[in-house]
Amino acid sequence: HIVFILCDGMGNSVIENSVDHMSTNDTDQDSFFAKHNQPCRLRAVFPSTTPAALTTLATATWPGRHGMPGWNLRDKKGCDLPGQNCVAGPVVQLRVLAEHIIDDSSGKLASETGFQSWDDVFVEVPWARKIYVDKNACRPEIQEKNKIKRKMIYINAYSGDDYQNWSQGDNGTERSDKSEGNNGRKRSASDFSEWQIGNENFQSETQTHQQHHSTLFETAKIEETAYDTLGTPKGSADAIKFFRDGVDSALSSIANAEKNGDFTFTYLYTAHPDKHMHSLGVEHDEVKNVVQGIESEIERFWRILGDRELLLMGKYDSNSVDLYIPSTEESKRIDASIIVTADHGHITIPPEDMMTLPDDILACLEYANVGVWGTGRHAYLHCRAGLQSMLQRRWQTNSELREHFLLLTVNEAIECGLFGPDCMRWQVRPRLGDFIAISTGRKTLAKPFEVDRCQHYCKCQGAHGSLLPEEMSIPFIL
């Protein structure tokens, strides 16, 4: 059984800031994370953002190969011709980490703006689709040769969203559902694909479990923390509680698989501590509470997996685990590994480090992909036709921009390997524009209303997206 846990934003510096580390040489006194982390083994992809990292995880390709190296990427389908306004689609700002894949500028579905399928958006195919074999389409001898060896279990608060469906192997095209009672109706692109559809067999206050008819895929949906509770004890308590529900769901699925002799791959995702840090900064006490709670739950997870009898009995509460002494007998343990990591790290941006692009720079641009939470730390800049040299000259004469940002042409960034060692796909290249402005410190390019709001309330924000060690260094906890 392989368990992969991704804690959004939980970089190594966040762990070091949040978890108590003993100063003695006795490693038995160290925290669970400290004992098991190999902090130099992994590094985030660039840009150090969630869409880039999760899509790399879903496709096993670099950001330059898949279609999501950032948020709100500008694109356009088709070519305009004189006097024919309907030939090409509109200019869009692609946003994929939402309930539906949309154009963020208009709120329209991507399918309404010229994109024919999710593959048209993501460019690369997810590995989950590559390993899937349709049992009904293959001859028995091919089924036996190519059958999937592991049951795939996905657990997060966003199951059912377009992005999760795509990453689990759906292609987002409409298809006819001919199962009993559906009368051949068509399902929308946000539904599970036919091989994932199943009946609910477990439901509680905080999670929904689905076992799909193929028995190869299983999903569970847990609750998400409300934004208005962030910064309060309830916010951190809810984040920990919902993560605990995810752990319990994973344990239940693994126990069922163990009884049946099945192998499993479990992917458990939590949006924390990232969600807290964006609103509060890295150093806030409630961020520390969330990280410590996540650590405690992962330790409980591991201790239960250490005893097959305890796992199969379903005794997952803390009291049962506290009374448990890990078995040293091989026959009482199950074959399991847990890997914990993050998509990126975080830094705190005080209001005085948030800045807007000056008017003379904006005059050269058609689109400035900036924002205080991350895009402003690797800003993609789309120039007006023919004004690239003018933008470079104006940038170099602005001392604040010149001092705090590295301005590269996107082609220079590609040649440096920032988006990976492989050649960038031609479908991805237009989404990055002409230049990328990479923050070399804490200065972050923000939208005017973000700067006004944060300065008015003297509010720090957590951010990421650039190349600082705090943003790029992520844990490998095994």
Image: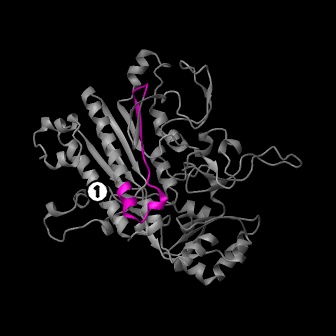
In the image, taking residue 183 as reference, residue 6 lies left or right, namely left
Magenta highlight range: 212-238
Instruction: Tell which of 407 and 193 is nearer to you.
Output: 193
Q: Does residue 235 belong to the magenta stretch?
A: yes
Q: Residue furthest toward the left?
A: 329
Against 402, residue 375 (above or below) is: above
The percent coordinates of residue 161 (x first, y second) are 53, 43
Point 43% across, 47% down: residue: 223
Q: Is residue 478 visible?
A: no
Could you tell me which secondary element the residue under label 1 belongs to?
Answer: helix
The percent coordinates of residue 173 (x first, y second) are 61, 33
Amino acid type of the residue that numbered disc 1 sits on in the rendered structure: Glu
Instruction: Tell which of 170 and 392 is nearer to you.
Output: 170
In the image, taking residue 40 as reference, residue 352 lies left or right, namely right
Q: Does residue 243 belong to the magenta stretch?
A: no
Residue ID for mark 1: 295
